Image (cartoon, rainbow, N blue to C red):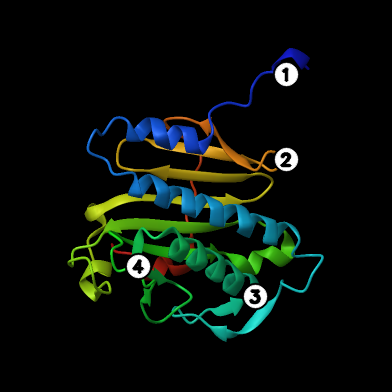
Amino acid sequence: MDHNKLALPVGTTLDRFIMRKQEDFPYATGELSQLLRDIALAAKIVNREINRSGLIDIAGAYGNRNVQGEDQQKLDVIANIRFIRALRNGGEVCTIISEEDEDMIQTGNNQGKYVVAIDPLDGSSNIDVNVSIGTIFSIYRRLSPTGRDGTEADCLQRGTHQVAAGYVIYGSSTMLVYTTGNGVNGFTYEPSLGEFFLSHPDIQTPQTGVVYSINEGAAESFSP
């Protein structure tokens, strides 16, 4: 093992990376940058909850079903609360749509310019067997005038109207991956420092591959 490599600086933090990217847009107000930080903060808190799920009573079923008809897990509910709280406190988001809530969530930030669609904890039933789980998020700029609650039209925009999207995977290490439409970058969480660091810059799909991976559970409903 090269011990000199272990002594090297960890690298660029997510905060610093976001600020550098913001500098590429002279007219940026910083609100989207702050929104991404809010999501990262919530992800850190959820990561902490997941890591101690075997020690306190937060694993297992909650007893309700979500909008997809899936059994809610306790961690689903906890993650949902954490993300909603972070996005509400941040002030940039007017409306949230979550897999765990049937109705739109109005944050009370009527001046907020963004809408967030989120699955706070996908695959949470896997937590009991220590399999990776994750958060999926999508960010849109609101269409309706500010000064009032967000609308259904704000939430039902085309995917091509996204201003940012990404996911967090909680596993042997925790990673946050996101894009604002110009490259995809991945950040690995360093728990001792409480920071996400750039670990996978400019992620791209390889031209060729040797792995076939697909969920064939609904193969009968696939298009011909």
- Across and down, in percent, residue 104 comes to 36, 77
Q: Rounded to the nearest whole Å, what is the CA distance between mark 4 and mark 1?
A: 44 Å
The residue lying at 44 percent from left, 58 percent from top is 90
The residues bearing labels 2 and 3 have C-alpha atoms spaced at a distance of 26 Å
C-alpha span from label 2 to label 4: 33 Å
User: At 45% from the left edge and 62% from the top edge, which residue is drawn?
Assistant: 87
| Amino acid type, callout 2 | Ser
Quarter of the figure with the C terminus: bottom left
- Name the N-terminal-most of marks 3 and 1: 1
> Disc 1 marks which residue?
7
Which type of secondary structure does the marked residue at label 1 adopt? loop
Of residues 151 and 125, the one drawn nearer to the viewer in this rendering: 151
Instruction: Say what secondary structure mark 2 lies in.
Output: loop
> Does the CB distance between marks 2 and 3 fall below 8 Å?
no
Is 172 situated above or below 92?
above
Q: Amino acid at mark 4?
A: Asn
Q: Residue 74, labelled with which disc?
A: 3
Which residue lies at the image location 22% right of the left edge and 54% below the top edge?
161
Front residue of 207 and 46: 46
What is the distance, in whole Å, between disc 2 and disc 1 at their CAs? 15 Å
Q: Nearer the viewer, mark 4 or mark 1?
A: 4
Residue 1 to residue 14: above or below: above
- Where 36 falls versus 50 (above or below)? above
Task: Give neighbour class at mark 4: few <14, some 14-19, many 20+ (Cα, 10 Å).
Answer: many
How far is disc 3 from disc 1 in space, using C-alphas? 40 Å
Q: Which residue is mark 2?
A: 192
x, y percentage for residue 26?
24, 33
Task: Tell us which disc is closer to us: 3 or 4.
Answer: 4
Amino acid at dot 3: Lys
